Image (cartoon, helix red, strand yellow):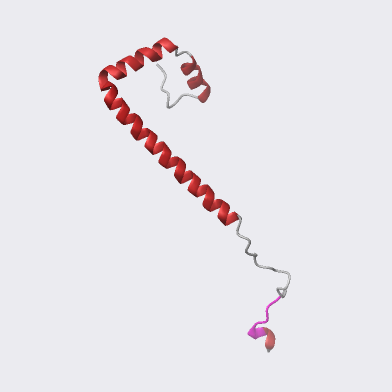
Amino acid sequence: MREIAGAAPREIEDMLSNVSIWQLLIVLVIVIAIFGTKKLKTIGSDVGGAVKGFRSAMNEADKETTEQLGDDSEDASFDNTPAEEPTKENHS
């Protein structure tokens, strides 16, 4: 049996495409039998809360980035900068 960690993305796609709906239903029944519906509901709520928190954090990061990019402050202008700044050695 091949290891998934060492498999190429195409090989993983081929392995997952061979899974039928009946195999998924059997796995679901076994998981429900082991954990029970109450435990699965709790796990689902926890995962949903984590996804919601992740989305809100991403939206905050996008908003901060937009605010930083939308800042209309001017950058330094090099048009009026002298080519050579006077130093003590040049004044002698």
Q: Which span of residues is magenta-colored?
A: 84-89
What kind of secondary structure does the magenta stretch mostly adopt? loop
Extreme top residue here? 22
- In the rendered image, which quarter is residue 88 located in? bottom right
Q: Position of residue 13 (x, y in %)?
A: 50, 20
Task: Return the residue nearer the eye: 74 or 56.
Answer: 56
- In the rendered image, which quarter is residue 68 located in? bottom right
- Residue 85: say if magenta: yes
Q: Position of residue 55 (x, y in %)?
A: 46, 41
81 vs 41: above or below:
below
Task: Return the residue nearer the eye: 26 or 11.
Answer: 26
87 vs 53: above or below:
below
Residue at the image position 42 percent from the left and 27 percent from the top: 5
Quarter of the image containing the N terminus? Answer: top left
- In the rendered image, which quarter is residue 21 located in? top left
Residue at the image position 65 percent from the left and 67 percent from the top: 76
56 vs 81: above or below:
above
Q: Position of residue 52 (x, y in %)?
A: 42, 39
Total marks placed = 0
Residue at the image position 31 percent from the left and 26 percent from the top: 40
Residue at the image position 56 percent from the left and 55 percent from the top: 67
Q: Position of residue 92 (x, y in %)?
A: 68, 89
Relative to 86, 11 lies left or right: left
- Residue 25: say if magenta: no
